């Protein structure tokens, strides 16, 4: 309400005041008027300049406002005397600069009790009156309430995503897409298995077939069966005898992180519980002593494995820093023949049916 | 009184009916609400001052909302939407406080 265009108020306000007449310039009137309109951001100025400007409003509104202004003179004086120091100072300054004649006339002629802001508020609230002003304000406040409610509701919902930035949202969406795709693939393969089981004439034979297939898959991971497939060959030569067990372990971990599915080093199969330890003149893997050059046969996606070893600060660079040399060769056919006997667990039992 | 009822009805309607806001309008709603709040506080103050005019109220309410939304829209187009809406909220907040201070003086005489 107290608008940015309140600035034009002071320009227009003085012209309005003299039009009120040159009647008795009540000191109270001057004080009150300027007390209310002299506040910093000029709500009053805005409103009264609007009144003065609009020809339509002039006839209708002015008498009413005069009455209110006039009638509140005395009470306002009291109120100001009681405490509104700042307003009063401004008020007196304004009073001395421009006389306040208009409102004084109103006081005498118009009936109406002394009304403070508090009384006006009470009068506006009770009893309810259906006037044009009230209805319009009610409509606008309805709109405000509506907007408020909508905003509060929408802010409280989906709060975690609502505050997120655009790039975060894109990333989340991407992840969801990936996950959906993976799950879709899995669903498809499971459905295929189910169909095979259902359609197979010999269901037991089919079940055995699938079980065997699964056993072979798990055997590759456990190292109990041989494996073949595309992959890489990593050869580490160690003329200075500087390669230690942890470097080989780093290499294995890097390979696993890049998706290696089966690993063999110098005819020793590397599986989940393989360990590396230093020993004289070489490294021992699972208790088997191996000596340089170390030849890793790795089955996995060559396009993933090769860069994983060659990244800056990665395995190959670290080894070269240690005066060892590492070479990586991609191959379409890696054969891993080293096996490892399956160890029956002493305590863990399968919880599956 | 009618006005207060209007506000209450509006809030209740917003929560109960759950209207769907068009996506284009959505970013400007919070700013528009703050601007409207500013207008309402200004109107309340004017009423206590005894100079309330419904015409001024309507015009200032609507222009406040439109200008606030326009500033944010422009800011979005210029790529400084977040900063500009912060600025608008700060300015409107200051004005709400100063109006609230005037209202307080009227109501509590302190």
Image: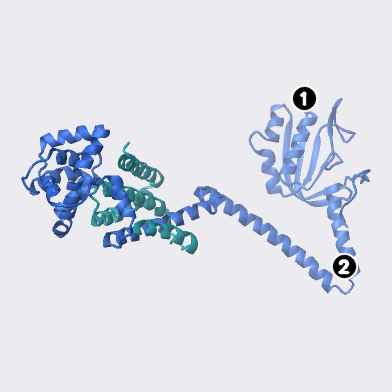
Chain colours: A blue, B cyan
Q: What element carries label 2?
A: helix
**Residue beneath disc 1:** A240
Q: In which quarter of the image is the C terminus of chain A?
A: bottom right
Circle 2 crowding by C-alpha within 10 Å: few under 14, some 14–19, many from 20: some
Image point 72% across, 26% down: which residue? Answer: A323
Residue B13 horizontal/vertical position (percent): 45, 62
Mark 2 / mark 1, whichever is N-terminal: 2
Q: Answer with the quarter of the image where residue B110 lies.
A: top left
- In front of the other: A151 or A216: A151
- In front of the other: B22 or A302: B22
Image point 16% across, 50% down: which residue? Answer: A66
Residue A184 horizontal/vertical position (percent): 69, 61
Q: Are marks 2 and 1 on the same chain?
A: yes
Total numbered labels = 2
Q: In this view, does B53 lie above or below A195?
A: above
Circle 1 crowding by C-alpha within 10 Å: few under 14, some 14–19, many from 20: few
**Residue beneath disc 2:** A206
Q: In this view, does A156 lie above or below A39?
A: below
């Amino acid at each position: 309400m107290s608008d940015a265009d309140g600035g034009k108020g002071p320009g227009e306000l003085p012209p309005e005041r003299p039009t009120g007449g040159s009647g008795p310039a009540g000191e109270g009137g001057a004080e009150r008027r300027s007390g209310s309109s002299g506040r910093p951001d000029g709500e009053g100025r805005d409103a009264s300049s609007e009144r003065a400007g609009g020809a339509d409003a002039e006839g209708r509104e002015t008498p009413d406002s005069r009455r209110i202004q006039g009638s509140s003179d005395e009470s306002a004086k009291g109120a100001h005397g009681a405490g509104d120091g700042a307003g009063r100072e401004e008020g007196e300054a304004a009073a001395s600069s421009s006389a306040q004649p208009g409102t004084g006339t109103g006081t005498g002629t118009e009936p109406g009790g002394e009304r403070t802001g508090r009384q006006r508020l009470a009068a506006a609230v009770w009893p309810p009156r259906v006037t044009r002003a009230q209805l319009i304000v009610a409509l606008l406040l309805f709109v405000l309430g509506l907007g408020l409610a909508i905003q509060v509701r929408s802010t409280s919902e989906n709060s975690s995503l609502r505050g997120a930035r655009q790039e975060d949202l894109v990333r989340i969406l991407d992840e969801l897409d990936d996950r959906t795709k993976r799950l879709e693939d899995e669903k498809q393969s499971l459905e295929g298995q189910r169909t095979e089981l259902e359609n197979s004439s010999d269901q037991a034979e089919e079940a055995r077939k699938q079980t065997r297939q699964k056993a072979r898959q798990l055997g590759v991971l456990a190292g109990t069966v041989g494996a073949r497939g595309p992959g890489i060959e990593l050869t580490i030569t160690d003329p200075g005898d500087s390669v230690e067990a942890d470097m080989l372990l780093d290499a294995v971990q890097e390979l696993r992180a890049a998706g290696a599915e089966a690993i063999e080093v110098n005819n020793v199969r590397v599986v989940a519980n393989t360990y590396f330890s230093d020993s004289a003149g070489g490294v021992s893997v699972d208790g088997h002593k191996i000596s340089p050059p170390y030849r890793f046969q790795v089955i996995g996606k060559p396009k993933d494995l090769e860069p994983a070893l060659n990244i800056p600060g990665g395995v190959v660079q670290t080894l070269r820093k240690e005066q060892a040399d590492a070479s990586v060769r991609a191959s379409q056919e890696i054969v891993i023949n080293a096996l490892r006997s399956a160890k029956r667990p002493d305590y863990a039992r399968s919880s599956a049916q | 009184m009618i006005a207060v009822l209007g506000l209450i009805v509006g809030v209740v309607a917003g929560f109960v009916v759950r209207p769907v806001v068009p996506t284009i309008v959505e970013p400007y709603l919070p700013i528009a609400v703050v601007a409207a709040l500013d207008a309402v506080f200004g109107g309340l103050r004017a009423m206590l001052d005894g100079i309330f005019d419904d015409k001024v109220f309507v015009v200032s309410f609507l222009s406040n909302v439109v200008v606030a939304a326009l500033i944010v829209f422009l800011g979005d187009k210029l790529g400084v939407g977040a900063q500009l809406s912060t600025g608008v909220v700060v300015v409107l907040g200051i004005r709400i406080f100063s109006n609230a201070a005037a209202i307080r003086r009227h109501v509590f005489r302190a």
